[in-house]
Image (tube, helix red, strand yellow):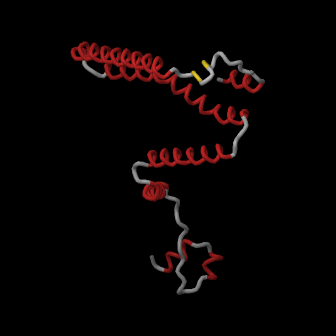
Amino acid sequence: KSKSTIYAEMPSSEADHVSENAIVKKPRKFRPKKVLKTSKRVLGGDNLLLSFTIAGVLLGVVLGFAVRSANPSETAIKLINFPGDILMRMLKMLILPLIVSSLIAGLASLDAGASGKMGRRAILYYFATTILAVILGLVLVVVIHPGKTKEGLSSNRQQHVNTLDAFLDLIR
């Protein structure tokens, strides 16, 4: 650009104070694509979600060891455990509908001739893996005895229910 073009773009009050040899720079525009490319390059490229997941796991491990060394009370442990318990319940609630809807969507995308045979195979595979998972779960429960402590089953102990437990159970 010529100097006259630069002066023409500036307000007249600023153009009077600029010398002939001064170079006037326009303000930089915000370019989100460029910022995204830079952040991808710095934070892990195309695997940005993987990078954040690994960082979250490492942060959780560090925080877990830090909190454990502080010897928190039983009430603090319940409050810290509560969001994770809610997350696990929500994930369990989503598993079956997600599997069934993905099977239906996959079979619906096939043509009529192939979907009959493929549908039978998909349903047979789903039921077979479900039955194997149930058998494996029953075997592990018999072998491991979850909930059993040195004193006996955890259900034999008297559990004291306080107000915090009652309120958290309302949300769960």
* Camera-side residue of 148 and 41: 148
Does 69 appear above or below 159?
below
* Camera-side residue of 16 and 140: 140
Does 10 appear above or below 150?
below
Residue in the picture at 63% in, 33% down: 83
Quarter holding the N terminus?
bottom left
Residue in the picture at 41% in, 48% down: 47
> Residue 54's spot in the image, x, y percent?
48, 46
Judged left or right of residue 132, residue 142 is: right
> Residue 55's spot in the image, x, y percent?
51, 49
> Residue 49's spot in the image, x, y percent?
46, 45
Choose top left, top right, bottom left or bottom right for residue 33: bottom left
Quarter holding the C terminus?
top right
Judged left or right of residue 161, residue 97 is: left
Does 14 appear above or below 98?
below
Does 50 appear above or below 167?
below
Residue in the picture at 25% in, 15% down: 112
